[in-house]
Image (cartoon, rainbow, N blue to C red):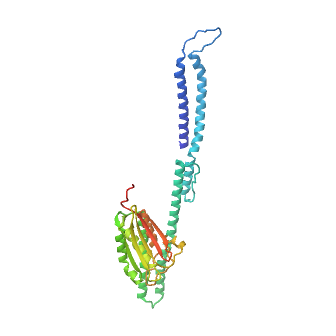
Amino acid sequence: MSARLKLTLSYAAVVVLAGAALLSVVGLFLLRYVPDVQIPQILPGEFIPNRSDLLRAFAPVAIAVMVFLIVTGFAGGWWLAGRMLAPLERVGRAAQLAAQGSLSHRVALEGPKDEFRDLADVFDAMLERLEAHVGEQQRFAANASHELRTPLAISQALLEVARSDPERDVDALIDRLQEVNTRAIELTEALLLLSRADGRAFAREVVDLSLISEEAVETLAPLADRRRVALDVGGDAARALGSPALLQQLVANLVHNAIVHNLPAGGTVSVRTHAHPEAVALVVENTGAMVPPHLVAILAEPFQRGTQRTRADDHAGIGLGLAIAQRIVQAHDGSLHLTARPDGGLNVTVWLPHPYPAPLV
């Protein structure tokens, strides 16, 4: 049986049982006070009914009332069940469309805020997030296939040119192929790291972001020296709960991005950690050229690169640094905010939950 038929039968059963109970009360508690004996007539031609007379008169009316209650219970129950289940039918149609691949449809349930309205709103929010996630994955897959195809096409072109050129420079060819292969390997590793962050397949432990920041700055100091970028690290001990490897990758990506895009040479990169009662913050700020607001909004998307170009002696980047940082932060239930500095450069602020939040007072 359908849910509507079950509800209809339930409504009808309640109405019929209530009517039968009411009639039983009348029969048992009222008629019992009427004697079932022939009452002598006081006046000539006067009729005084006894219990049997009242039962004979009451029975047809009771049967008619029960028939009316049964019909009314089924008709009214069917109508009420249809109205009550209408929101669920709308949610069901939206779910069917979503299962067929159409994620743009919304339930958009009107009316007062009740359990059905809450269910429809939650379902719409889920569809919205799912649509955004699928769209992002589609764009990412298209960009990833393009980025992976580029080094393979370059390698194939180099091999074809070398095959057709009898006086080819083998050493130059090997160097160029090694450079292209290194880029492809880095891209593949970045994609694997991004997938690992999305899947949240990591063990969590307490990590101090201030220590990780110092290690990242020390590791990237040679790159900063080549670019004449001053590094400044400091702040409070900021403990977060997460994967040490992923959080190290997060800080390294942010600091590397700040150094590489710090043009012209001679700028500064500041790394600060802050501890608050409910959350910890990591702030990476760099000088540089002005960043347009429209570019700031998409910098954390995969394969997006800033307007600044790295020098020929530096790694050009694969456009996944901030995207990986964004996914790592999301996997740790945090948030990443990008802000263009008024005098040029970028401010990146990462908020992560405190492993031992202060109790509410």
* Residue situated in front as seen by the camera: 305 or 6: 305
- The quadrant of the picture occupied by the C terminus is bottom left
Q: Quadrant of residue 285?
A: bottom left
In the rendered image, the residue lying farthest to the front is 361
In the rendered image, the residue lying farthest to the bottom is 167
x, y (%) of residue 353?
40, 62
* Residue situated in front as seen by the camera: 198 or 165: 198
* Residue situated in front as seen by the camera: 28 or 130: 28
Name the residue: 56% across, 45% down: 85
x, y (%) of residue 321?
44, 73
Whether residue 185 is visible to the viewer of this picture, yes or no, is no
Whether residue 25 is visible to the viewer of this picture, yes or no, is yes
Q: Quadrant of residue 30?
A: top right
Name the residue: 55% across, 42% down: 4
The answer to whether 38 appears left or right of 234 in the picture is right
x, y (%) of residue 114?
53, 48
The answer to whether 146 appears left or right of 186 in the picture is right
Above or below: residue 89 compared with residue 56: below
Name the residue: 59% across, 22% down: 58
x, y (%) of residue 192?
42, 69
